[in-house]
Structure formats: C-alpha cells, structure tokens
Image: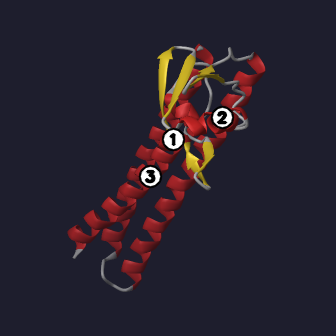
Amino acid sequence: MAAADLNKLKTDLTRRMDGAIETLKREFNGLRTGRAHPGLLEPVKVPAYGTDMPLNQVGSVGAPEPRMLTVQVWDRTLVGAVEKAIRDSGLGLNPATDGQTVRVPIPQLTTERRAELAKTAHKYAEGARVSVRGVRRDGMEQIKTFEKKHEIGEDLAKDWSAEVQKLTDTYIKKVDETLVEKEKDIRQV
C-alpha cells in the first residue's frame, strides 16, 4: 500500500500546486508592464451574441510592435463592442479602430503605476503561496488519516510528511522566482 499511495498522493498534490503556479502566471499576464503582450487583454470580456465572451473568442490578438497590440475582429459588427470593452476594462488603455482592426497603444508607465503593479504582483504571489500551503495542509491531513487508521506506521508518516514539505518548499520557491521575474519586467520597461 505505502509506495503506491505515496505516489498517488504526491501526484495529486503536484497537480494542485501546478494549478496554483498556472493561476499566478495568468494573473501576472494581466498586469500591464508597459510592453505589449497579448495576454494583457486576456481578462477583457466583450458583450457579443447575447453573452460576455472572452476577447480571444471574437478576434485574434497580436503584438506587432513592442508598444502596440492589435485585435483583428472577426465579425465586423463587433468592432465597436471590442473597442468599448478594452477601454472600459480598467487596464488604462485607449484603443483606436482601423477598419476591422482595433489598435491598442501601450502607454509608458509612471513611477507610481510601477509601484502599484509591484504591490499587486506581491498580492498575487502571496495568494499563490497560500494556495500551495493549503494543498500541503490537505496532504498532511491525508497522511494523519492514514496513520490514525493504522494503514501506515509513525515512521512512514514522518517520511511522507517530509516529502510533502519538500514538495511545498519547491513550489514556494517557484512562486518566489516567478515574482522576481515579474518585478524585473515591471522595472525594466
């Protein structure tokens, strides 16, 4: 029972911790760093066909220049809605329409805005750390349950707990490294 269950537990915890890292990366993509990146427009929802649709489902987003995004809208009737959705998204962007293409210039960041972005990045990273620790807590509880049911011994429970802690430390380090990269990105531009 022991080795197979440990691998199954470790696989489950790894999958869940990977999810926390992926969520963090998606949140970081939404932070405007002054450089054009198609992921910047990911949170934008466009009212289309009676529902709010993600922008990437009504057009293709590209970054032809370092400080310009373009959205090639597939349905001509949605161009105005796309422009309005980007303008109202709270990202501080001012799009302009050019036929079926919406051009989105990325303005230079101010020092205050960089500080705000850094604070937001830290908040997102702390959320990811909390998620990873929550996964660790669940893993530790499962180990205690196995021990209480006498499915594993005390020594094996300690070994498993050490494995879960090692996995947690690895993922916390990944969160910290991702945060450092994002901070560098925010300062660079």
How would you rate the neighbour count of disc 1 (Cα within 10 Å): few for under 14, some for 14-19, many for 20 or more? many
Q: Where is residue 63? Give x, y as percent.
A: 49, 21
* Relative vertical location of residue 76 with respect to residue 115 in this rendering, above or below: below
Q: Is residue 102 left or right of residue 150?
A: right
Q: Secondary structure at mark 1?
A: loop
In the orientation shown, which residue stands out farthest toward the bottom?
149
Q: Can you identify the residue that label 2 sits on?
A: 80
| Label 3 close to label 1 by CB (< 8 Å) | no
- Pointers 2 and 1 in contact (C-beta within 8 Å): no
Q: Residue at x 64, y 37 (%)?
A: 122
Quadrant of the snapshot with the N terminus: bottom left
Q: Nearer the viewer, residue 26 or 151?
A: 26
Residue 3 x/y as whole percent = 21, 68
Q: Amino acid at mark 2?
A: Gly
The tag earlier along the polypeptide, 3 or 2, is 3
Picture residue at 41% right of the left edge, 83% below the top: 148
Q: Which residue is mark 1?
A: 58
Colour logic = secondary structure
Marks 3 and 2: which is nearer the front?
A: 2
Residue at left offset 61%, top offset 56% = 50
Instruction: Return the disc, 2 or 1, that comes first in the chain's sequence.
Output: 1
Does residue 26 lie above or below 142 as drawn? above
In the rendered view, does 166 fall on the left or right side of 67?
left
The crowd level at tag 2 (other Cα within 10 Å; few <14, some 14-19, many 20+) is some
**Which label is found at residue 19?**
3
| Mark pair 2, 1: CA separation | 12 Å
> To which quarter of the image does residue 105 belong?
top right
